[in-house]
Structure formats: structure tokens, C-alpha cells
Amino acid sequence: MEKIVFEKNNIRNYVKTVIAEKIQKLKNFIEFTLEASRDIKKTPKYDSMREEMQEEIYQMQRQLGALNDLRRNMAKVLNNSTERVQLGSLVVTNKARFYISVSLGEFFFEGDRFYAISPESPMAKKMMGMKPGDEFVLNNIYQKIVEVL
């Protein structure tokens, strides 16, 4: 991978925005489903339909709780420049770009692919404390750290 300059603060803000958008979208779905459940007319299938909707609302509320946890955890992610991999580091390897922050998964920022991973993930645990030039193998895949921001 060629050396590209990334503005870590912009990536951090982007991840926070993605989480906030997901939270808002889920809140809208929950509200819509609640309104729909109130509008169900008494029919022979009334109880089963209402029960299914309640289950759907419950599942969405659990997802909302998880997203709120991500938002809280993201607030703990510092934006300092680092020499060694730690929470908040943007790690560029010869294979991929990892943002050690929260478990958001793959995302694209300004046309580049990144992976927002939790510091508890096996990949982050493997890289913690490493510096540019260090190498590691995870799941039989060799990677070399090119840059730590």
C-alpha cells in the first residue's frame, strides 16, 4: 500500500456520525412500529400480530442499547497521535487499515476501506503495543504494520 496521509480526527468524526445516524434510524423504526402496533384493529389475528410487533420492538431496543454503548465507548477514544498501537490508533498494515475504536466493522471513508475494530478483538489484541515495522500473523495471514497514527 502506498503511503497516504489520513486525517485521524476526520475518521473519528465519521465513525461517530455513522453511529449517531444508526441510532436515529433505529429510533425512527421503533416509533413507527409502536404507532403501527397501536393502529392494529381487533381481528382474529390481533393478539399474534401485536405479540410479533412487541418482539420486534424489543429486538430493536436491544440494538439501540448496543449502539448507545458504541457511542459511549467512542467518547473514550482519544485522538492523540501515537507511536505504538493503542486505543484510538489508526493502524495501516500491508493488507488493511484498522481504526482501534469500537466494533463497527468495515466502512469506507473518502474512497478508502477501513475497519473499525474493538480493542477487545483478536486483531487489535495482536497489534496492541506494536510499532511501524512490526510483523504479526493472525489466522495464517501475515501482516506488517506500515504506519501507526
Image (spheres, helix red, strand yellow):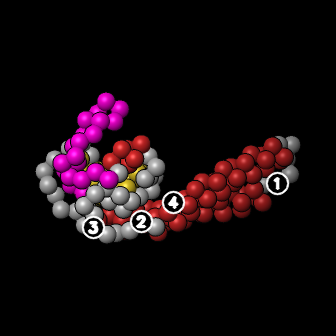
Q: Nearer the viewer, mark 4 or mark 1?
A: 4
Q: Earlier in the sequence, mark 1 or mark 3?
A: 1
Can residue 107 be seen in the rendering of this structure?
no
Give the CA separation, mark 2 to mark 4.
Answer: 11 Å
Q: Earlier in the sequence, mark 4 or mark 1?
A: 1
Question: What amino acid is found at the position of numbered circle 1 in the picture?
Answer: Lys
Can residue 66 be seen in the rendering of this structure?
yes
**Residue annotated with mark 2:** 77
**Residue annotated with mark 4:** 70
Q: In the picture, residue 122 is in which quadrant?
A: top left
Q: Position of residue 111 (x, y in %)?
A: 25, 55
Q: Nearer the viewer, residue 5 or 80?
A: 80
Give the CA separation, mark 1 to mark 3.
Answer: 58 Å
Question: What amino acid is found at the position of numbered circle 2 in the picture?
Answer: Val
Considering the numbered disc 2 on the image, is that residue within a helix, a strand or a loop? Answer: loop
**Residue annotated with mark 1:** 41
Give the CA separation, mark 3 to mark 2.
Answer: 12 Å
Q: Earlier in the sequence, mark 2 or mark 4?
A: 4
**Cβ atoms under marks 3 and 2 closer than 8 Å:** no
**Cβ atoms under marks 2 and 4 closer than 8 Å:** no
Q: Is residue 47 left or right of residue 127?
A: right
Give the CA separation, mark 4 to mark 1.
Answer: 38 Å
Task: State the residue at coordinates (27%, 67%).
Answer: 81
Q: Nearer the viewer, mark 1 or mark 3?
A: 3
> Which residues are the magenta region?
129-148
Q: Is residue 9 left or right of residue 49?
A: left
